[in-house]
Amino acid sequence: MKFTEVNSQPDYKSLESGVLEFWRDHKVFATSSQKPSPAGEFVFYEGPPTANGQPAMHHVLARAFKDLFPRFKTMKGFHVTRKGGWDTHGLPVEISVEKKMGWNGRNHGATRAEMEEFNRLCRESVFTNIKDWDYFTERMGYWVDLEQAYVTFKNEYIESVWNLLKRLWDKGLVQEDYKVVPVSPRIGSTLSANEIADGYRMVNDPSVYVRFPVKLETTPEALRFELERQGVKMEDLHGTALVIWTTTPWTLPSNTMAAVNPDLEYALCDSPMGQIIVASGAVTRISELQKDLPPLTVLATFKGALMEWWRYEQPFPESFKELNLEGEKHWGDSSTPRAHFVALADFVLDTDGSGVAHEAPVYGAEDLALSRVYNAILCFGTNGNGIMQVGSQKGKFFKDADKELTRELRERGLLYYGTTYHHSYPFHDRTGDPILYFARKSWFVKTSVNRDNLVAQNDKINWVPSHIKEGRFGKWLENNVDWSISRERYWGTPLPFWISEDGQDKICVGSVKELETLMGRTLENADLHRPYIDDATFVKDGKTFTRVPEVLDVWFDSGAMPSAQWHLVLDPDGVAQDPQALENFVKHFPADYICEAVDQTRGWFYSLHAIATLLYDSPAFKNVICLGHVVDEKGAKMSKSKGNVVEPLPAFDKFGADTVRWYMFTATEPGDVKRFSERLLLEAQRGFVNTLWNVYSFFVLYANLDKPKLEDAPAVAERPELDRWLLSSLEQLKKTVNDALEVYDARGAGLALEKFVESLSNWYVRRNRRRFWTQDGAVDTAAYATLHTALVTVAKLAAPFTPFLTEAIYQNLVRGVDSSAPESVHLCDYPEFDASSFDAKLVGEMDAVLRVVDLGRAARGQANVKLRQPLSEVMVRARGAADALALEKFSAVIAEELNVKAVKLLEAGTSLVSYSLKPNLPTLGKKYGKNIPAIRAALQTGDAAAIAKSVQLGASFTLETSDGAFTLEAADVLVDAVSPEGYAAVEQDGFLVAFSTTLTRDLVLEGLAKDLQRAVQQARKDAGLEVSNHISMRAELNGNSLEALQTWESTILSETLCDALEYTAPLATDFVVQLEDGGKFGIARA
RNA sequence: GCGCGGGUAGCUCAGCUGGUUAGAGCACCCCGCUGAUAACGGGGAGGUCCCCGGUUCGAGUCCGGGCCCGCGCACCA
């Protein structure tokens, strides 16, 4: 049996490229998805990235987690369909093409030819970086089927999306309504939120307080009653006005309501301009506007709620006449829209302005929502390009109308006070125009009527981290508003809505076949994108139908993937056009597992969830890992301008993709922000990857020398305790890792693996080193077999985490000697816990041994007695009887590890040990709460030795305290052994380890012999000898050193593979070492 | 403004339902060990557990208030 030699310092780049080549040549990924899957299907959805950009570190994070669980489940006997996907529509693509075409933010009013060119370029640019993505995907070891990937711009995908919309439409869940959107006025185009995010600037705007005179004859009864109760007579009131505050006088012609907060207190005041009504909280502020005039006098106060429906005179009533919006006429009919009355709204505050808000619903989202509640008229004082449509300023740009309108207000006696206001306002950075918030017709999916079900379906989902469920995602669902799905753009799934020329009839088309039937001809192979689809018109019932111009929100595209990735299309009768597609869909819905970063809560996570809830009354996924963002070492966002970006590919080459993956899994909890730097990667590499590799290379190095016959190894029960301990620990590891991965706890599993590998390397291998270099005599096959088992098992357990490293280990250790084994580690069964191989007692015992060895080393360190100096005995006091037995059993191990001749267990009462007593708070605190201080004091002053004795016997005893006598159980007291005088001793948690530091002459000689032996070993290394080379030696020593060598000659010779020793001066050809005491020796290869 | 998460050693992070002297890794210093390991072991130094108040025998942990950081949502009349 011969293993391929392994370099102890691996070159991860070439190692990983070798593994990739192996996977390619042997089609391992494909094989893994064809192997038997007794456990059934594990459903995974790939959240589609946009290939338009470059792969970055946050993609590594997401893909590491996306890869982990499918690999795990595959090894657990599941089949996992790992269909790739690409998100190809949307802003990133459009913006890059806009730049290319020099459109500079314009995406409205393109000619048909321009649109054709635009979409052609979009289609081309989508996969600009596809080669980088393909390489990146393979390089990091992400197994996903890119050949069968779904692509959102393909006709088949679009058709499936249409089909979903049609099914929502048929349920009455699609409707057209107004929506307030940010518009760049001159080009009339709708902007997305991130297009205006950077456009905020501080500007001076007008700040005007305007009188809205109320119609006293419409005063609500309750308010009239309240005023009279406070001594205000209605007949004394004349010209009373609400005072509103606005920074946008140009919206006043569009005013339809005045809003007050129902819970705030309002005040009727005498002012220099007659009686006014403002919020009580605003009275002082408004008085101070005009310091030279007398302050406001409050006549009466009342809740805002009392003013509901109070009517007032609009400052620019002519705008209503011009637009034929005679809201007054229908006042008595609550079913027709009305205007110019007081509405109640929680969002109105009294911290700014007057506490009365002027409402022009077409220019504000909240205002529009309020107008729906009150069924108020919509008055469009401007058009969508911000040009005034009414009044004296007709034809002017909205921002330019402020000054004149303010002057008119003053002339009409309606301006209470005017000044300017310094605040931030968004501008479109491409045109420099101020943003216009404007109500446009938009298409909605009525998600809000299903709000309760959205919440109920979410309840079935397991979120990692769990707080997202009730927090970010749950709150978002509870506050759900209708989903606006239309976008005024070109490159997207066209909305499949056709409208008749008179606007009366609307048809949603659910498939290409349906459209062809309506048109009475085939579409051939037409592209379903604009502008071609806009040509598709048809006549029905004598009316011509044309498509609405908008395209679909890209999030709907990605949320449609459960059915669209299979090109599922149902006919109106509910029958699938392709039964295979239906079968695929049913088999893969809902997902068992998805994973993306936290920004997808309102993106993909939501769109999947909303569509699944509305159409299938089911969640779309059962488990989801919601990842935190990747930032730099200091917690700052990575950005090119800061120069703190860690690029994935160079990091893969420098540290290995496995190291990067390992870091992603174990550095922090997945939901936390992930700090990232080369320094942190190096830590991850040293902590796990290198350690595992070093144990592996150690094994291969010696196995190739000893050539053990692993199949002849003794049965586990016959192997030494340390072997059985390691195998039991391994069993425990299997359980921990399996349990953690079953609940999607990647970090818990990873940390357990790391801890095991650490103890494998620094305890098992170190303890057993000499078992691996038996010369001449029998090869210790038990040791080799045990280490082999441990390495192979760890390789399998870690395979989903670090697929390259583990593959390399597996190929050499398993496939190298057993060609009947599965071809790849990734085709193996995942190791499962086997209770019959697990010895919990042994694991516990070894814990005690490890503790004592640690303490012993600490004691030697404190007494400054180096470990190479043998000592006669170590005295140990165990924490309890079980531990004492364990220490006795492993006394040889302890003796060797601590370099002592004997281990002596100390009994209670030994003069070497005194005791200190402490209350065991978790048990005692519950029983005697308030008496703890008294008990603590009594324990300190009581007879420690006697109490320690009862505790050791497990007996209860009575303790006299200042609070009286208490009966304490043995478990209520913690007994610590205190370091005795004159010994090197260390004590912790009930364990005590002490050395007598007295040295006999024999011990001194033995110590010197060890020093010599060590010097020879170092000389061998310095002389460049192989570990298996034999040597001859000439020593010219004096005094103690000479005696030590003579006394320990045979040991030293055999330890250093020295065949011949002469007590003479070294030869000229020898490798010579000069000792501190004046002696010297020389060695040469035998 | 609201919501979610976070604030523990120089750095990256653990600290379960309150409980003994608050831990680990990295980095630093000293000592040791090394016939696999650019490793490893021991010790040292390094902490106002963000701040204030409360509950409790006892608070890093629970409660109230505040500050700071990240993310999200809203608003900016």
Image: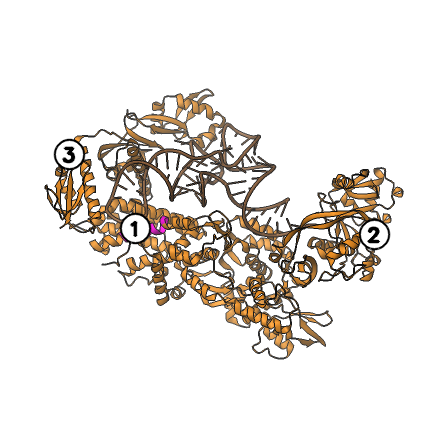
> Is A688 inside the magenta-drawn segment?
yes
Q: Nearer the viewer, mark 1 or mark 2?
A: 2
Q: In this figure, which residue is indicated by the disc labeled 2? A: A313
Q: In this figure, which residue is indicated by the disc labeled 1? A: A695
Q: Earlier in the sequence, mark 1 or mark 2?
A: 2
Quadrant location of residue A950? top left
Give the magenta part as a residue range.
A686-698
| Disc 3: host chain | A
Q: Colour of chain B?
A: brown
Q: In this figure, which residue is indicated by the disc labeled 3? A: A1040
Quadrant location of residue B13? top left
Q: What is the distance, in whole Å, between disc 3 and disc 2 at their CAs?
A: 115 Å
Magenta stretch, main secondary structure, is: helix
In this view, the residue in front, A971 or A59, is A59
Chain letter for the orange part: A
Q: What is the distance, in whole Å, between disc 1 and disc 3 at their CAs?
A: 38 Å
Q: Are marks 1 and 3 on the same chain?
A: yes
In this view, the residue in front, A1044 or A1039, is A1039
Q: Are marks 3 and 2 on the same chain?
A: yes
Q: Earlier in the sequence, mark 3 or mark 2?
A: 2
| Identity, as a three-letter code, of the amino acid under mark 2 | Glu
| Identity, as a three-letter code, of the amino acid under mark 1 | Val
